[in-house]
Image (cartoon, helix red, strand yellow):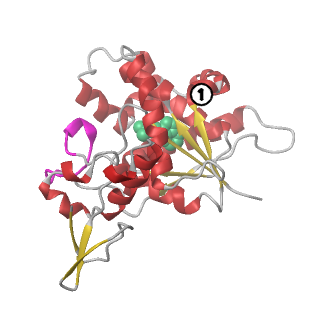
Amino acid sequence: MTRTILTGDRPTGPLHLGHYVGSLQQRVALQAEYATYVLVADLQALTDHFDAPEQVRAHVLEVMLDYLAVGLDPAVATMVVQSQVPELAELTIYFLNLVSVARLQRNPTVKDEMRQKGFEADVPAGFLVYPVSQAADIAAFKADLVPVGSDQLPMIEQAAELVRRFNRTYPGAGGPVLVEPEALLGAVSRLPGTDGEAKMSKSLGNVINLSTPPTRWPARCAACSPTRAISAWRTRARWRGIPSSRIWTPSIRTRGRWTRSRRAIAPAGSAIRW
Ligand code: TRP
């Protein structure tokens, strides 16, 4: 039986290199082998951006462009916009009865985010329960595997717990109804930021977006091995309809020689300039 992958991103801004090495790379590599669903989690984005729906809406398209740019193929993988599948919200409601408020408050990722956003004293209920809606995303598609960065591990654990509890509480006539998911970590589960901080993250302002032209990268990004970002940026520019004369071609120096390369794949140890 074909196994299923589901994963997703909140459309709160453009995706960056941390997303690429944490999860996007795995999705691209596995999309043909697994039934793959990639979710743009716009309802989840509203849990901390409820006052900026236009921004969330605009970022749905930006995130889709990033998906295409890194090589997710819409003919192979299925892209899903969360709000367009109301059953996900419905399953969230059933799941909410199977978890305690205390358990939700113990989720370390949610705790960190609450601290970062200054929500400690007055957290919106929707934000506290977003791991439950994420569990519903995963369970509704009967995903076996969820490629994510390491910050998402507590979410997958919580989803697996909810699935077990659901299957115990509502046993199906022909065996368990839902599938218990497992996380799949990327090659680099936590990419350092351009400032040398432990994690590349939008809220820390130390990211290189897949959509940022290489001429605007901070000098220090050489440390982040930018070759893949270059080709993602170029593909993205093409999808956006930017004329090819404006899509920069990098010069790559290998063994002492500078050459203009149409493909921005530089062997390890080579230098890049624009
Ligand atoms: N929480 C994830 C993030 O912040 C996004 C997400 C929503 C997700 N639903 C998911 C990830 C289901 C994996 C599976 O990026």
**Residue 23 to residue 115: above or below:** below
Instruction: Between residue 258 and residue 41, name the one nearer to us.
Output: 258
Q: Main secondary structure of the magenta part?
A: loop
Q: Which residues are magenta?
A: 194-206
Residue at left offset 33%, top offset 47%: 16
Residue 165, given in percent of the width and then of the height, sits at 63, 36
Residue at left offset 17%, top offset 84%: 256
Residue furthest right as drawn: 173
Q: Amino acid at mark 1?
A: Leu
Q: Choose top left, top right, bottom left or bottom right for residue 22.
A: bottom left
Instruction: Between residue 104 and residue 91, name the one nearer to us.
Output: 91
For label 1, the crowd category at 10 Å Cα-Cα, with few meaning under 14, some 14 to 19 and many 20 or more, is some
**Residue 125 to residue 75: above or below:** above
Quarter of the picture holding the C terminus:
bottom left
Magenta stretch: residue 138 in it? no
Q: Is residue 26 left or right of residue 114?
A: right
Q: Which residue is mark 1?
A: 98
Quarter of the picture holding the N terminus:
bottom right
Q: Is residue 2 left or right of residue 228?
A: right
Q: Is residue 37 left or right of residue 205?
A: right
Residue 44, given in percent of the width and then of the height, sits at 47, 27
Residue 76, given in percent of the width and then of the height, sits at 65, 53
Magenta stretch: residue 205 in it? yes
Q: From where the camera sits, is residue 121 visible?
A: yes
Q: Secondary structure at mark 1?
A: loop
Residue at left offset 56%, top offset 36%: 135
Question: Number of labelled discs?
Answer: 1
Residue at left offset 53%, top offset 58%: 28
Q: From where the camera sits, is residue 193 visible?
A: no
Residue 131, given in percent of the width and then of the height, sits at 48, 32
Q: Is residue 218 left or right of residue 7?
A: left
Q: Choose top left, top right, bottom left or bottom right for residue 117.
A: top left
